[in-house]
Image (cartoon, helix red, strand yellow):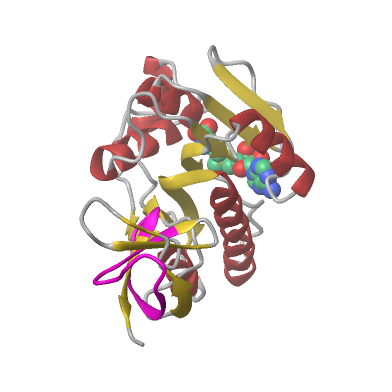
Amino acid sequence: MARNQKDYFYYKAKDEGYRSRAAYKLQQINKKHNVIKPGDSVVDLGAAPGGWLQMAKELSGGRVLGVDLQKIAPIEGVDTVKGDLTSDRILERIEEIVGEHGADAVICDAAPNLTGNWSLDHGRSIDLSQAALGVAKRLLMPGGHFVVKVFQGDMFKEFLDEVKENFVYVRSFTPSASRKQSAEIYVIGKKFISTDIKAGNEYDVEIQEIGEQGDGITRIGDFVVFVKHAMVGQAVRVRIREVHPNFAFADIIE
Ligand SMILES: C[S@@+](CC[C@H](N)C(=O)[O-])C[C@H]1O[C@@H](n2cnc3c(N)ncnc32)[C@H](O)[C@@H]1O
């Protein structure tokens, strides 16, 4: 077969020792969106045969863990788990390996077995992407990043909105290494927000201390909320103004 544009990344991967052309998709996603930086701990869901794992290891040099239904042949410095990313038992194993610090990035290139029936394939892809989002929410440290593959279709926007609830910045992106005829698109969520607290929510709180900038500090669950013009010991009703990955700002309303 000629080295035409269609097979460019296939041959490039063979030449450069990557296990799949998909490695270049991750490289292009990272070039554009900067989701993996040196030293990061990365979890890759649906990782076989391992092109993304090789690229993730190259980009981070840190701890990299791959999960797949299929066995992944060893890659130096990369841990692997064979199992289903939608299973609680597997998630518990991944959590144990990742440890308390959490992951800096969760990436997912998993794909269901395609049947050729567009709406069935789309539905299964959305189910898998939602499962990956659930895993990311359990594993990511506050401010961590998420990448997930989705096959486009009528439930795509709803899924994108779900990702938007959990990350400060969300974009979709099609790398040029994706095949032209492919319906796949990657959703990038940056800066994981590690709380269910949302802008506009109201809470009755007590101000516990005063921060360096003079704002009152309260905690909703473990989550730090800064309240302007408040005094220690004051009991107030606040409305959340802005939510960041590991703190929020609120205003006194009563
Ligand atoms: C397109 S391949 C991933 C290619 C990989 N990113 C690479 O660069 O080599 C999709 C993978 O998703 C895996 N997969 C699909 N459903 C899964 C599930 N429920 N749990 C774990 N892996 C799954 C498949 O076994 C398959 O290996």
Front residue (pair 31, 239): 239
Residue at figure coordinates x 36%, y 32% from the top left = 9
Residue 241: name its quadrant: bottom left
Query: Which residue reaches farthest left?
Result: 213
Residue at figure coordinates x 54%, y 36% from the top left = 44
Query: Which quarter of the image is occupied by the N terminus?
Result: top left
Instruction: Answer whether residue 73 is magenta in the image.
Output: no
Front residue (pair 215, 169): 215
**Residue 183 visible to the viewer:** no
On the image, the x and y values in percent for residue 99 come to 60, 32
Residue 187: name its quadrant: bottom left
Residue at figure coordinates x 54%, y 35% from the top left = 43
Query: Which residue reaches farthest top?
Result: 76
Query: Which quarter of the image is occupied by the C terminus?
Result: bottom left
Give ligand 1's quarter of the image.
top right
Query: Which residue reaches farthest bottom?
Result: 254
Task: Give above or below for 184 relative to 91.
Answer: below
Specify start and end residues of the magenta stretch as a single range: 224-247
**Residue 88 visible to the viewer:** yes
On the image, the x and y values in percent for residue 234 come to 39, 73
On the image, the x and y values in percent for residue 236 come to 40, 79
